[in-house]
Image: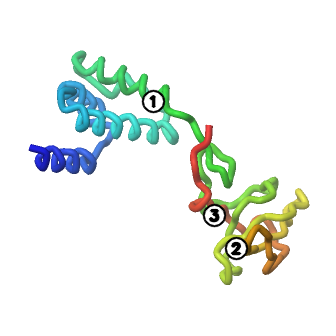
Amino acid sequence: VAGMMTKVEEVVEEYPINLANVVYLAFIADQFSMFSNVSQILLGRCASFLFQSLLTHVLDFSGLFFDPQYARAALRLHNMIQEMPMGYCTNCKQFLCQEAKPVPQDVHLGCIVRHPELTSYRDWEVTTNDGEGSVALSNSRRLEGSTQWEGVVQVEVSEVTYHCCRHNSVNS
């Protein structure tokens, strides 16, 4: 039985969730709450999917279900999403991470960026910003508590893009 539950959990973790089935799947998770681990995995995935969808879309929950029997599941998802922490990217300081997008003229110091012609290093840090379109980028190596600067270059802010993937985390 334990092997079968493990297989069911694997299927639930991989089952595709979309706006057409998210409330139905939450309803199913609620109906099978006696299998608490599987139910929680599915319900959590449904809530996470809706949370991620809400980052880029305005969503009217009333359009997600057509049968009154699903209303409780939709309400439960709504309540779960309300409890999730809203976050931002710690590098670009934006609610929606701006990975690989052009940086604005007011880019903050310490932001990690990329420049298409500076390929000798992956990460460049904004160390100065004149506020008028020019920034200094530095590449450093941290050795035993000290910082060794390996290169500093002055570029136009319009030439660089955010490089957030290593720094992208949710903070509230």
In the image, taking residue 79 as reference, residue 31 lies left or right, namely left
- Residue at screen point 45% across, 31% down: 59
Q: Which residue is mark 3?
A: 163
- Asked which secondary structure carries label 3, the reply is loop
The numbered mark at residue 81 is 1
Category of crowding for the residue at label 2, using alpha-carbon neighbours closer than 10 angstroms: few (below 14), some (14–19), many (at least 20): many
Q: Residue at x 44, y 40 (%)?
A: 53
Position in image of residue 151 (x %, y %): 80, 79
The alpha-carbon separation of the residues under discs 3 and 2 comes to 10 Å
Amino acid type, residue under disc 1 in the picture: Ile
The reply to whether the C-beta atoms of the residues labelled 1 and 2 are less than 8 Å apart is no
Q: Quadrant of residue 154?
A: bottom right
The amino acid type, in three-letter code, at marker 3 is His
According to the picture, the residue beneath numbered tag 2 turns out to be 115
User: Tag 1 or tag 3, which sits nearer the N-term?
Assistant: 1
Task: Identify the image quadrant of the C terminus.
Answer: top right
